[in-house]
Amino acid sequence: MNSTILVVDDDQTALDIVDLVLERAGYTVVRSSNGTSAVSGVEESNPDLILIDLMMPHMSGQQAVRQMRSKGVKVPIVAFTALDDPRVHQEAREAGCDLIVTKPCKSRDLVRGIQSLLETT
């Protein structure tokens, strides 16, 4: 089954890299460059999983995740962050993230984490 992943990041280079990694792993990628557009477009994109950066301008990843969860979004959400801070990771979990992946990471580790979440849903 070809799963669709919504990738949310304000860094174009990060979007390009993650897009390449996920497409090579067989996923369809839908991109969003900020939390506001991700929240407003999540129903239209109908993803099987969301991969979201936590540090974005205007609306943080945690705020976007809270809004998506309050709208009834049930799919797994992976926080993708450069912050290796236990408090930030706890805030992400409390917002509704199912997994936190710290940048930089190995491509295979990211794909394995995503596969594991998709297999359990």
Image (cartoon, rainbow, N blue to C red):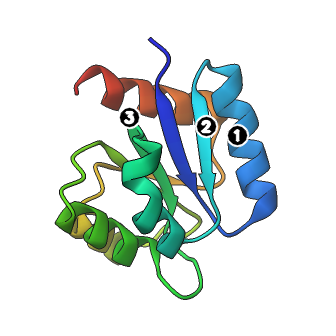
Seen at 18% across and 56% down, the residue is 72
Between marks 2 and 1 in the image, the one whose residue lies nearer the viewer: 2
Q: Is residue 78 visible?
A: no
Seen at 46% across and 59% down, the residue is 41
Provide the residue designation for mark 2. Answer: 29
Which residue ends up furthest to the top in the rendered image? 1
Q: Position of residue 56 (x, y in %)?
A: 58, 78
Q: Earlier in the sequence, mark 3 or mark 1?
A: 1
Q: Quadrant of residue 114?
A: top left
Tag 1: Cα neighbours inside 10 Å, few (<14), some, or many (≥20)?
A: many
Q: Quadrant of residue 121?
A: top left
Q: Position of residue 89 (x, y in %)?
A: 35, 66
Q: Earlier in the sequence, mark 3 or mark 2?
A: 2
Label 1 is placed on what type of residue? Asp
Q: Quadrant of the N terminus?
A: top left
The CA span between labels 3 and 2 is: 10 Å
Provide the residue designation for mark 3. Answer: 48
Q: Earlier in the sequence, mark 2 or mark 1?
A: 1
Between marks 3 and 1 in the image, the one whose residue lies nearer the viewer: 3
Provide the residue designation for mark 1. Answer: 19
Q: Classify residue 93 as left or right of residue 42.
A: left
Label 2 is placed on what type of residue? Val
The CA span between labels 2 and 1 is: 6 Å
Q: Is residue 120 visible?
A: yes
